Structure formats: C-alpha cells, structure tokens
Amino acid sequence: MALVMSQIVQPEILKEVNLVRLRRLVRLLKEYDGELIEAGKMLLKRSIFSSYFALRDLACEERVDAVLANVSEEYLRKA
C-alpha cells in the first residue's frame, strides 16, 4: 500500500511548510525579477502556481490569498 505525504505528516505541518515555500518563491520572484532570464522566471512562476494548488488542496485559501495579495498580477502572468 502506497502512502502519500499527507497521510504521514500532519496537515498543519504541511500547511506551514508550503506557506513558507510560497512566501520564499514570491520573495525570490520579486527580488530577482530584473535579473532572471525568461526560463528562470517561468520556473519560479510555475513553482508558485504549484504551491498555490497544494495549499488550496489543504484548505488554506485565506492564508494563500494573504500572501498573494502583495503580488501584482504582472509578476504572475505568462507562467
């Protein structure tokens, strides 16, 4: 029987780990936006997208929205 990570780790821990990851990715995108090549920006944006859905699956929408509220749409376009 295969176990998935959410069955092993408590959901609250998963939420915190993924929120930290999302905050870090958003910070990196803002901080290095002018220095990254398009491929680097694309990877960061896709990682943000992935983190968003992981947190949404963990019923953490309000906290995710608070993190992403500080990100303008132009940063997240063309992901």
Image: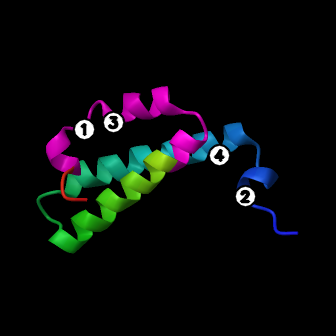
Residue tagged by mark 4? 14
* Magenta segment, prevailing SS (helix, strand or loop): helix
Of residue 28 and residue 51, the one placed in the foreground of this image is 51
Residue tagged by mark 1? 71
Residue found 39% across the figure and 31% down from its top: 65
Please tell me which of labels 1 and 4 falls first in the chain.
Answer: 4
Of residue 34 and residue 10, the one placed in the foreground of this image is 10
The Cα–Cα distance between marks 3 and 2, rounded to whole angstroms, is: 25 Å
Residue found 25% across the figure and 59% down from its top: 79
The image quarter containing residue 70 is top left
Q: Is residue 37 visible?
A: no
Q: Is residue 2 left or right of residue 72?
A: right
Residue tagged by mark 3? 68
- Which amino acid is tagged 1? Val
Q: Which disc number belongs to residue 5? A: 2
Q: Is residue 50 left or right of residue 40?
A: right
The Cα–Cα distance between marks 4 and 2, rounded to whole angstroms, is: 9 Å
- Which amino acid is tagged 4? Leu
